Image: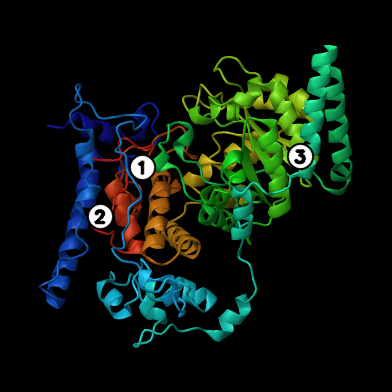
């Protein structure tokens, strides 16, 4: 007798459940069969590798065994209703950064220098002892060594045998070293000298102080005369005109197409231990390879930048391949935002600065930043004009339709922003309250694009194919911004430029993941810490990539961003594995690229409560 699940499969795509993508009937399957295939392949692979390990050394435990921390079902047990968690993963455990090296090799030893701390040094100086305790190498070739001619991580590199002599000396390829000599691959790093001055509050903000002093003077004058608003507005207007006389003639407004990563931080309240400690520059490099024109860093908080927080400055880093690059700033007060803009203008190389007034995170909104600025127009105006006054590059603004779901206010704000001097506006077609519960309102974006003219307005929301992009451009927007769509399929930029649906193979998708892993090793390091940080970012990305359905399997092309994939069998094992929404399968993919996970490895996606069987 057929089960209800099997009956649904046999009926094919004609009766696809509401909200599910329509897939050809021959590829549809059930949950049990799907996981059964993956588990059988996994167990077979484990048995083969375990037997190989036993042949080599029976005394050693196989390092490919699944570590206990990966099975996190116990964290969700004991609920009164006995149901699985859905939506926000509020019961996820509080996790702290994990240390994977019991003892790290001293950096001075790696660089073949004398350690300034001597016997008091916390790190290991005994090379032989360190090499004996070090985890086995991941592979036979080191990407960093093969690309740049030398590996800065030396003996601590997880591919060290590729560039280390038997007597533990590091090798170099002189021809490659010469090619990259004096070349800065990543810009906008904060120097120790600047960090020291920021912490001592000895950085000068001359232009900012001039602007803010006038605001203060006008406020005092208004208190005395009872009519200070007019004079204050007159100064702001004049300041904006003075500053942008050369900008409007010398530079065209820079369009912004944010292709940086989007986690569901705007849906889930992050804990301090979950805050990102670095930007995802490797992902932007992947997008550039597929044709992204403009990239933008992740949102940075202006107060943290002014205080010299290294983790916040990491969000401003720019790879040399990012030919047009901007940064996003968040703040709620004219003084801090203006000073931060001047700090960026004098110490970084960017093509534009973007005010993120569309961020819906509670932490930001409750302090008046992000979406909160849309309802605080007086402060918003001062922020925009103050930043314009100190910047030499265009200033852009990102907004939402509004705060409440049924109360759009962007159309009222856009005409005012044109007078404030913004160079471009990006509009996300949802309100703060709406989040991702409904589709983006492109009809409203069309209306706002007409109101914004001649200021360019970019639209954002629900673009996952070149057809979506073409329809968006027909609305009259000057360009489009892609976020989630790029995370689900970064090759969307190629599809848009070539006007086609790309039935990309699983091997090609694995090559993309290899590129990302190599870029991650360049950016975060090829030692154990760098490898595991790369793995963590890779796993977060895989939680989006698994939503992609290959074109050849679809009954109806293209896939829509609001359609969830049903259980289906791919055209080969790898394609099926990449379709899994189980965190253990994502870890399995990461092990193909970055080797076995450490025994104490833990990973729990912040936005996927049901990433378990």
Dots 3, 2 in contact, CB < 8 A = no
Q: Residue at x 57, y 55 (%)?
A: 290
Helix, strand or loop at disc 1? loop
Q: Nearer the viewer, residue 254 or 442?
A: 254
Q: Is residue 296 left or right of residue 269?
A: right
Is residue 437 shown above or below 253? above
Query: Residue 402 at what x, y percent from top left?
Result: 61, 21
Q: Residue at x 79, y 15 (%)?
A: 223
Q: Residues within 10 Å of mark 1 (few under 14, many from 20)?
A: some
Q: Is residue 81 left or right of residue 501?
A: left
Q: Nearer the viewer, residue 538 or 506?
A: 538
Q: Is residue 543 left or right of residue 488?
A: left
Q: Residues within 10 Å of mark 3 (few under 14, many from 20)?
A: many
Please tell me the numbered disc located at residue 600: 2
Query: Residue 24 at what x, y percent from top left?
Result: 36, 41
Q: What residue did someone put label 3 on?
A: 208
Q: Residue at x 69, y 47 (%)?
A: 343
Tag nearer the camera, 2 or 1: 2
């Amino acid at each position: 007798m057929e089960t209800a699940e099997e009956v649904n499969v046999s009926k094919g795509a004609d009766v696809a459940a509401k909200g599910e993508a329509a897939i050809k009937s021959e590829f549809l399957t059930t949950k049990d069969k799907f996981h059964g295939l993956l588990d059988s392949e996994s167990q077979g692979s484990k048995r083969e590798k375990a037997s190989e390990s036993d042949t080599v050394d029976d005394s050693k435990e196989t390092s490919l065994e699944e570590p206990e921390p990966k099975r996190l079902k116990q964290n969700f047990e004991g609920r009164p209703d006995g149901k699985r968690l859905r939506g926000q993963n509020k019961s996820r455990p509080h996790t702290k950064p994990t240390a994977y090296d019991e003892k790290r090799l001293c950096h001075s030893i790696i660089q073949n220098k004398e350690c300034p701390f001597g016997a008091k040094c916390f790190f290991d100086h005994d090379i032989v002892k360190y090499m004996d305790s070090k985890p086995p190498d991941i592979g036979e070739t080191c990407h960093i060594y093969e690309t740049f001619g030398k590996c800065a991580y030396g003996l601590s590199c997880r591919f060290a045998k590729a560039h280390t002599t038997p007597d533990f000396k590091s090798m170099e390829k002189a021809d490659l070293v010469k090619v990259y000599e004096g070349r800065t691959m990543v810009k906008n790093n904060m120097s120790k000298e600047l960090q020291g001055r920021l912490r001592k509050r000895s950085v000068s903000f001359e232009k900012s102080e001039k602007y803010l002093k006038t605001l203060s003077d006008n406020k005092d004058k208004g208190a005395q005369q009872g009519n200070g608003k007019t004079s204050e507005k007159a100064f702001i207007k004049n300041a904006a005109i003075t500053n942008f006389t050369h900008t409007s003639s010398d530079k065209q407004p820079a369009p912004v197409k944010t292709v940086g990563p989007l986690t569901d931080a705007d849906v889930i309240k992050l804990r301090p231990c979950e805050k990102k400690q670095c930007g995802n520059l490797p992902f932007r490099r992947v997008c550039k390879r597929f044709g992204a024109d403009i990239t933008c860093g992740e949102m940075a908080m202006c107060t943290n930048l002014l205080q010299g927080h290294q983790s916040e400055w990491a969000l401003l880093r720019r790879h040399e391949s990012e030919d047009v690059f901007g940064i996003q700033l968040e703040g709620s007060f004219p003084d801090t935002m203006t000073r931060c803009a001047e700090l960026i203008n004098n110490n970084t190389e960017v093509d534009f600065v973007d005010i993120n007034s569309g961020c819906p995170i509670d932490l930001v909104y409750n302090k008046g930043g992000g979406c909160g600025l849309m309802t605080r127009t007086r402060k918003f105006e001062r922020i925009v004009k103050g930043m314009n006054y100190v910047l030499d590059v265009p200033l852009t603004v990102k907004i939402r339709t509004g705060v409440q779901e049924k109360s759009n206010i962007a159309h009222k704000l856009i005409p005012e922003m044109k007078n404030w001097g913004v160079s471009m506006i990006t509009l996300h077609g949802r309100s703060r309250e709406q989040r991702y519960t409904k589709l983006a309102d492109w009809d409203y974006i069309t209306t706002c694009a007409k109101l914004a003219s001649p200021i360019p307005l970019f639209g954002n929301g629900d673009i996952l194919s070149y057809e979506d992009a073409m329809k968006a451009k027909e609305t009259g927007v000057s360009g489009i911004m892609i976020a989630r769509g790029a995370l689900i399929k970064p090759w969307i930029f190629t599809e848009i430029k070539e006007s086609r649906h790309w039935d990309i193979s699983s091997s090609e998708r694995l090559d993309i993941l290899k590129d990302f892993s190599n870029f991650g090793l360049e950016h975060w390091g090829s030692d154990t810490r760098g490898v595991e940080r790369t793995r963590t970012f890779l796993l977060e990305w895989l939680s989006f990539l698994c939503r992609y359905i290959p074109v050849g399997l679809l009954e109806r092309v293209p896939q829509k961003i609001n359609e969830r994939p049903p259980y289906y069998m791919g055209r080969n094992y790898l394609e099926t594995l990449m379709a899994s929404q189980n965190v253990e399968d994502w870890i399995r993919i990461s092990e193909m690229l970055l080797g076995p996970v450490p025994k104490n490895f833990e990973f729990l996606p912040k936005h996927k409560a049901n990433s378990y069987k």
